[in-house]
Amino acid sequence: MGLPLQNKSYLVFICAFLCFGCLGAIRLINFNMPAKDDIRLIANGNATFAHIKGQIVSEPRIVENNDWHFAKFFPSSTYTTFLVNVSDVKTQTGWAKSSGKIKFYVNQGSNKFKIGDKFQTFCSLEEFSNAKNPGQFDVRDYMRRNGIYLCGSVKSADAISIYEKQDAKSGLGLKVKISSLAAVWLNEDLEGNNSQLIEALLLGSRSKIDSKLYNDFISTGLVHLVCLSGLNVGIFAWVALWISKKAGLLHTGRSIACIIATIVFLLAVPAQSPVLRAGIMFIIFCGAKLVSRQSLALNSLAISAIILLLIKPTDFLTVSFQLSFGALSGIILFNESIVTFFRPLMRFGFLKGFFGLLAAGLAAYAGVAGIVAFHFYKIQILSAIWTVPASIPATVLIVLGTFKILITTLSPSVGIIIGYILDLAADVLAFMVTIFGKVSFSNISIGKVSIWVIIAFYLTLFLWKFLPFKTFKKQLIYPGIIIIIFLAAIFINRFQKINNLQLEVLAVGHGQCCVMTLGNNASIIVDAGSITQGNIGERIVNPFLDYAAVNKIDAVFISHDDIDHFNGLPEIYDKRNFKNIYTTQQLIESYSGTAAELKRLYSPKAAPEKFSQGNLNIMKLWPVGTDVEISDNESSLVLLAEYKNRKILFCSDITKQAQENLMNLYPNLDIDILITPHHGSARTTDDNFITFFKPEYLITSAGDADFGRTSEAIKKFEKSFYTFRDGAVEVRIDGRGRMKATIQNTELSRQ
């Protein structure tokens, strides 16, 4: 007995997919091999300097880094960045041809550069740094997936000499012209914040959106609305089809008009996987109409994937590619089944549209749930529901925004009217997303999920679709398995931490942030700041807390009034409220600008002499008394944390005098871990203090530039870890008091 025709089609699809996978692996290996003249061979793993020539191939972007609370107290770090195709490099014998793409940074804001400009400069070249903390966005990994292995930088825009301006007649110049005109026509007569949101929806400029609103889009699972996707292409194509019909074009003319319109749209927006995928699929659909053939969605999806991966085979490793193809695969495979399930409820006209959108949202989420859980450590169970109401103003914005781009030059008065409607729709969408973001269970942190859990999830979906059970009771088996997998993903990290204490000293440059988590999901933070890395709350601490499935903070200890110990707190607080914030009496009575801002935000209390959370006991050893006349550093909190007879001493920035006082006050104290004082500085560290309490591990939180000033006693200590070199340092203490320290791939343990 042969297979049904539909199953044969799926079998052919699977076989073709496997064949393409094998060929793709060969193509991927070849793609990653550098050419003989590749610019990355010059650096060869080390920072170097070089004279280069190249062309700017991405829109230059000025990054101000001022979208976090304490940025006003932080040294300016504005820079300009763009991508460069390298063409030549200067050698001892003169200029020689070179190839490869680099990310370029100018350490100041400058409007001097335009996409398409050709320039030469003498710059530094180095590899990207890898992520030094769990959960942190890995820039090096991301860049390598995009075929970029080096970054170049100069201190000033004056160090770059532009020898050929952008050619308006070139393909790149045409793309820039179309994109610029679209942005101008769209933003005319729109309000500031709304224009940024609308431009993100239509033209993909999401970096301009208010950071808090953008975070709400992420936390609600609605970020796809402000990322260019198939929805944009679909609506734009529908508008093009409607206009071609009104123009009296027949089927052939409509298809050609829609293909041209889609190509123009792709030129006007950034070349991102979701929009390229949708654009290719629609062009295939129109092409099939031209030759009187039917286009199957699954075939079009596969062809678009093949085309994109032939161009850049590393694309399948990117999150945007996975989310785009995962969402559409989910809709193609599961939407019909979900609609069938809802059909009894769709008899009422006003509910038909609601459940139709809900079915599409659920089908799309089925396709991306595992991807979101794996990359972002979250389950967003309400995203499909939020999509239903949010898609209404989003669709209005995309449809009318498209019309505004096309009509503004022809009829400015109509463009003004459309602009008013767009402003209103943008306000409604922003309001919805903000309200949805306040629903606590909209976004569940589950921590790092094993790849095997993700494979089990997608394997179950595959079996549910292609090997369904016939009887009603057995049909519940697959949903039951999926529910079990989701529960496992939620609770597996919590079960692993039962009776354990995990200390994470994060790598934040010159600053300090220590996080202690217990098996009962209790968490305590000791300091959270840096003066060499901006916005560590959003970029380092929150990603780690997501990675570790930390949903609440029970207490925060701020050691003293130095901004490199607390300027990351507001961004952490925005995601996870703190139950208690403790600090020194000196900070509470301080009149400094940073202390005043901190007190305005949180009203911290004086640290208690003792604090307990489950089996974790914390004792304040210093300062003794309430003398507010001593310096900020000398009055720094010194905390002793004890768990299962293991002791951790947090020293903050105490001076030599305070260290001497502690040795006199606690001559018999025996500890296991010492967080070294004042970032290991030799100038303020008493060498006797380092070994006085007999620690097994030293952990120094410092930046790269601090190592030259590090105490010799710390350098000579056998088990001495540095966050600038080793990245985040993790220490686990289990229920029997066994301790293990982990630094990236190095593990030391003591039974």
Image: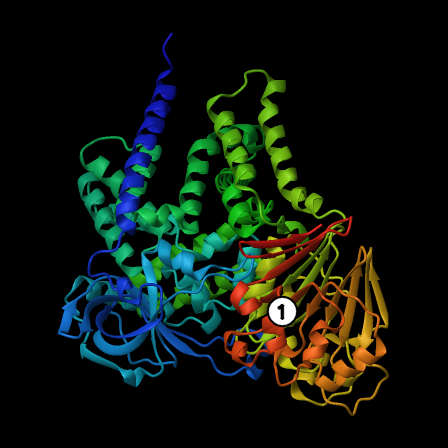
Q: Which quadrant of the structure image shows residue 90?
A: bottom left
176 is higher (above) or lower (below) than 682: above
- Residue bearing mark 1: 717
Residue 213 at least partly seen: no
Q: Please tell me in which quadrant of the rendered image residue 437 appears.
A: bottom right
User: Where is 305 relative to 542, above or below?
Assistant: above
Above or below, 72 relative to 34: below
The residue under the point 37% across, 59% down is 143
Horizontally, is 382 left or right of 40 in the view?
Answer: right
Judge whether residue 100 can be spotted in this image.
yes
Dot 1 falls on a residue whose secondary structure is loop
Instruction: Determine which quarter of the picture holds residue 141.
Output: bottom left
Foreground pick, 364 / 53: 53
The relative height of residue 541 versus residue 65 in the rendered view (above or below) is above
Sort mark 1 into few (<14), some (14-19) or many (20+) by Cα contacts within 10 Å. Answer: some
Whole-percent x, y for residue 750 in the image? 69, 53
Asked whether 316 or 625 is in front, the reply is: 625
Q: Estimate the x, y position of residue 431 in percent, counting from the top left.
A: 57, 61
Q: Quadrant of the N terminus?
A: top left
Percent from the top left, x then y, of residue 593?
A: 66, 87
